[in-house]
Image (spheres, helix red, strand yellow):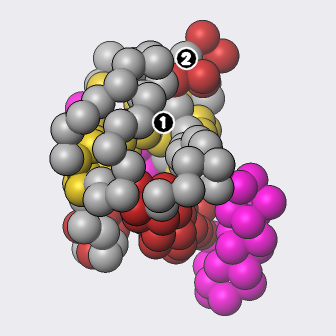
Amino acid sequence: MKFDLLDFLKLGLSKLDFDGQLELSWNKEQHTFTIEITFVMEKKARALFLDMTGETSPKPAITFVDAILLYDRVFFDPRRVQDDYLVCLPFDGQKGWELAKGEALLTYLQILLDNSQSDLIEFLNSSDSSKITLFELEWSAEEFSRILAETRQVQDKDYWLAYPKL
């Protein structure tokens, strides 16, 4: 059975080990997929912290959300929205995405989730406010490229995940 890009993402995201939420949405009109990453964590040591809007929150837990955008390079221009996403990754129209890129994304995403979850726990539980002043997810294009190169080396053929048929 051949998977299209949507099927691949649904199945792959469901297999990732993550205590938060991963939500996939497909915007058929814009030819985009969004992977929303949501962390919900209880803070222990810090009584108050400032969110990105500068507001303080005495709540015992925080919700942190970021997203990855996959877009059709032929149909969609990400320049106007790229600051709203952790990363914007292009695919090739109806041809879709190279399987190696999909596998590299899932591999790197698991690493990113693991590292970010540890960083967020440290951030929330630190009583030393000078130690960590900001928490944000950080995408490493170099690490993703390294994983992609390794993935391409072990694949037998050039397989593509086609864009879903409407």
- Of residue 86 and residue 43, the one placed in the foreground of this image is 43
**Camera-side residue of 75 and 89:** 89
Which residue in the structure is indicated by mark 2? 81
Q: In this orientation, which residue lies closer to the viewer: 65 or 82?
A: 65
Q: Who's the residue at 25% across and 67% down the image?
A: 19
Q: Is residue 125 left or right of residue 142?
A: left
Name which quarter of the figure residue 142 lies in.
Answer: bottom right
**Vertical side of 70 occupied by 140: above or below:** below
Looking at the rendered structure, the secondary structure element under dot 1 is strand
| Residue 144 appears in the picture as rendered | yes
The quadrant of the picture occupied by the C terminus is top left
Which residue is disc 1 drawn over? 69
Label 1 neighbour load within 10 Å: few <14, some 14-19, many 20+: many
Q: Which residues are magenta?
A: 139-166
Label 1, label 2: how many angstroms apart (C-alpha)?
9 Å
Q: Secondary structure at mark 2?
A: loop
